[in-house]
Image (tube, coloured by chain):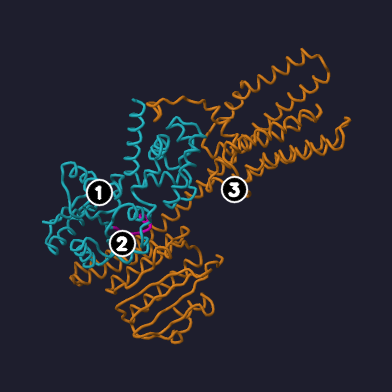
Chain colours: A orange, B cyan
Amino acid sequence: MTIADDLDIKPVSERVDLVVAWSSGPSTWATPDSASTPGTFAAAMLVLAGAAASATALIVAIALDAGPRPFRSRVLLVVLTVLCAGVMASCTLSALRWAPGVGRPRGIAFVRITATVVFACIWIATVPVEYSPTAWALGMFIGGEGALIARFVGYERPMRQMVITYLRSPFHLGALTAGLVVVFVARDPRVSRVVITEAISLEFIALGALVTYAAVRQLFRREASFAASVRLAEREAESLRRAHWIHDDVCADVREIRVRLAARQLSQEEVANSLDQLDDRLRIRQLDELLSGGAVAAAEILQPYVRRAQNAGVTLAQVPRFEDASVSLSGPPAVLLRRCIAGFVANALQAGTQTLSIHLARDHDDLLLEVTDDAGGFELADAPDGRGLSSLAKDLGSGRLSATRHDGGTTMTARIALGRAA
Amino acid sequence: MTRLLLLDDAAVVNDLFATLLRDSLQIDVIPMASVGELEHALDRGDRFDFAVVDLSFPEERRTGMDALFAIYSADPSTVLAVITQGDSFVAQLLRDLWELLPIATVISKSAPIAFQIDQVRQLVATGSAPIDPSVQPLLPAERAEWRSLQRFSHLVPHIGHAKLWEALLHAPEDVSYRDIVAATGLTLNTVKNYRAQLLPELLNHGLDDPSLREMRAFAGRCAPIFSGLIAESYRRSRAKAAT
């Protein structure tokens, strides 16, 4: 039972629903994640190739037409052909975000259907019988778009069902029947020629569409299968790493605390400190996993170090605003931010600060981190070479790390370039 | 005596923390370990002056949103607070709660115990407390006017939108248009149109041209709010059909 069953809703057949969906084009249904996969890109290239090939075939047919058509008419037909092919292909370009999507679905459907009908009419009027099989290229366009849209909306139809549906469809049977009737009634060789061209073209369009649809669906299945196997391999490797770390580090630390407790070597305060240190290491490890997984908000990078200061009894006088800390980072900028905050907080704690202020701000293409303590003055030049701050200064770049003394404390400033390549 | 609800599925730690709070603050602290237990209590007529609620209840497949919304619906005068690890897993849910409900403070479970007790002390004494510094950067300083509980009704203006959200609430994680069509009986284009109509209002909730999957995740986070609005929409539709 569907949600609509208890309200008066007329059901629409799935076939009609899919045809209406197809008419509004892939850009209507594509979403940023579904449109950005390699499989979608390959399918879209097939669609564009089909549109280009069918337009080329038609233009060649117009140019080589031996009939008495004036030159101006031929130019007009060529221009119409290019326009129609462009309109037909534009939805695929929009789906790939290579062209802006314009108009509402209903308007897009109207324009697409009009362009397709005009294209078909030019084809029937121009293409000779012996040239009709080149219509398979148009089939490639239709089949590729159909497969793209089916993927975006989540419909799966077996090939056998598609073939039977097409053969039995009113469109196919009606077109063939109408053609036969016209041939028998008209008994005119020219009319017969047009009808035979239309019939052969239709069958080759269908053949091209079904073959392309099947090929693209197979491509999507293999892409999904490959992606799933890669994800599985990554998950297994990550689980193994995590298991090793839990076994070697976490369990070892917990055991040490238990053994020392049993040997009465730890006071309550020392146990609390040991647990705080374990908590800190777990959070750093959690941050490692976040950073290796992709983009992370700056707030999440700063969080373990804010906690570290809090646990050390330091008062956090200021922390970054949400608007500044919600910037998403990955790669070198994320790693540099982490190194900066880790180093600044560690140095401030070591120097005995009672208060910390952490400020984060976006400054054009840079992220500015400022950490102010009240632990006395500090000179950057005093930092030993090759370690800690000295190495950080080198990695940030010249002039991007500074220490400013003020009454009773120091402000460490780091300027991190956001556009750094991985 | 002041009644403070402490709701956290880590029952042992929760009971211990409740004891610490009772001893420190001399107030009546009622620990509970599940959203179900809370709902029974609210149905019995229990009410609280303060509620400190965790965000994650994985065994019940519920969240702090379910609990806090139930408390707020039962008695809007209850002062609400969140207690959380505050990590990335719950960051978006925390932000949603902060913007949609009158959350007075956020306590970090990882802060020193004395700091946490002090936050609760301030909360009980004044009705609010500074947010824990490690969690503060996750929350905007000012709550957006355009993102409120009252404005949520703009996301369910019509029975068709109610059907869409209801289908999303029950949809699988990799939801497709086909799943929505199968659940609602609507056509593909109708579902698409309903989604398109919601896009301007979804932008107020930080969702820029969201996929169905993102809409499903949003619906899941705000499930108790949507459930009420969907039920109301169906009720209005049936009442209209009856007349």
Question: Are dots 2 and 1 on a single chain?
Answer: no
Which mark is nearer the camera, 3 or 2? 3
Separation (CA) of disc 2 from disc 1: 42 Å
Q: Chain of mark 1?
A: B
Label 2: which secondary element: helix
Q: CB of mark 2 within 8 Å of CB of mark 1?
A: no
Residue range in magenta is: B84-91
| Residue type at tag 3 | Pro
Q: Is residue B89 within the magenta segment?
A: yes
Mark 3 is surrounded, within 10 Å at the Cα level, by few (under 14), some (14 to 19) or many (20 or more) other residues, namely: few
**Residue A75 coordinates in the image, percent (x, y):** 82, 39
> What residue is shown at x 48% (from left), y 63% (from top)?
A329
Q: Which mark is residue B162?
A: none
Above/below status of A129 relative to A84:
above
Relative to A133, is B177 on the left or the right?
left
Name the residue that disc number 2 marks. A251
What x and y, as percent, mark residue B205?
41, 51
Q: Secondary structure at mark 1?
A: helix
In the image, which is nearer the foreground, mark 2 or mark 1?
1
Q: Nearer the viewer, residue A185 or A402?
A: A185
| Image quadrant where residue B154 sits | top left
